[in-house]
Image (tube, grey):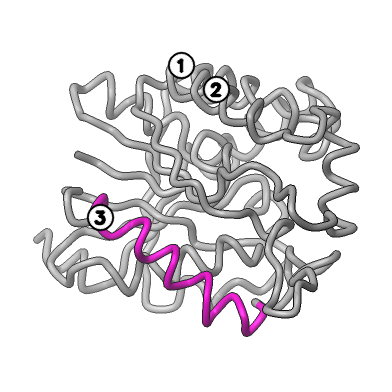
Amino acid sequence: MILFISPHLDDVALSCGGFVARLVRNGESVTIATLHTADAPTDRPLSESARRLHAQWALGDQPYRYRREEDLQACAVLGARAVHLGLDDAIYRYDAQGQPLYVENFIGGAVHPHDWEVHLPRVREALKLLIRQARTVYCPLALGRHVDHVIVRQAVEQLVDSAQPLIYYEDFPYAHRAESADSSDLTAGMFPGTVALEEEEVALRLQAIACYRSQLKELFGDEATMQRSVREYVARIGGERYWQRFDAFRADE
């Protein structure tokens, strides 16, 4: 089994949809495991960021019910198995005193100490069995430094066996804006490799991303802009770019 790890319901389709479609077409068993898929809490007030996103998504008080359905549709387009691991998104997490951990600083901000202490172990536990069963693991570089991506990457690195291939994908659409930001620390000691996509694979990536209808306005404005952004990035990169550590390349020689 090839395992793609997604912090949120859309990250793998956004970033790796073309390659996932190719792997499935070539007969591989691909699982997309998404960490943060739980419904909004009902025992405490929503954070400011949660209220703002709920209003933008326009999916009611429990938007993740709809978002999980979007993900199932996208994974079906790509031919991958979807696994939802049921953890709370950053906008729904609180400290021991019941205060929201993040208001407006969950993208590009520092991970809250409470998350390192409490949420990181939960992510590790949720991923432990799947990673043990995987032949190859793909995880986000954490471009854009969304706190959920940063925590997921840390958890994966702590779990993957030294002999197990670990490959990093470029988080899209953050990667489309990362050229002007210093992300060298995220790829230190790694080498890139590019998967040149066929038109059919690009089209399947676009079709899968379009399944996340609630997210298109927030991420791109509209579907036409999404398609243009993806095609521009694919053309500039030459497909989809993935990263491995030097030792991993040596192990494959």
User: In this figure, which residue is indicated by the disc labeled 3?
Assistant: 131
Label 3 to label 2, Cα distance in Å? 24 Å
Label 1 to label 2, Cα distance in Å? 6 Å
User: In this figure, which residue is indicated by the disc labeled 2?
Assistant: 208
User: In this figure, which residue is indicated by the disc labeled 1?
Assistant: 77
Mark 3–mark 1 CB contact (< 8 Å): no
Q: Position of residue 179 (x, y in %)?
A: 68, 60
Q: Which quadrant, please, contains the N terminus?
A: top left
Q: Which mark is residue 152?
A: none
First in sequence: mark 3 vs mark 1: 1
Dominant secondary structure of the residues highlighted in magenta in the image: helix
Q: Position of residue 74 (x, y in %)?
A: 52, 22
Q: Does 101 appear above or below 252?
A: below
* Three-letter residue code for mark 2: Ala
User: Is residue 252 on the magenta stretch?
Assistant: no
Instruction: Specify the farthest residue to the front.
Output: 43
Q: Nearer the viewer, residue 115 or 208?
A: 115
Q: Which quadrant, please, contains the C terminus?
A: bottom left
Q: Position of residue 130 (x, y in %)?
A: 26, 50
What residue appears at the point 68 percent right and 79 percent down from the top-left corner?
A: 96
Q: Position of residue 139 (x, y in %)?
A: 41, 55
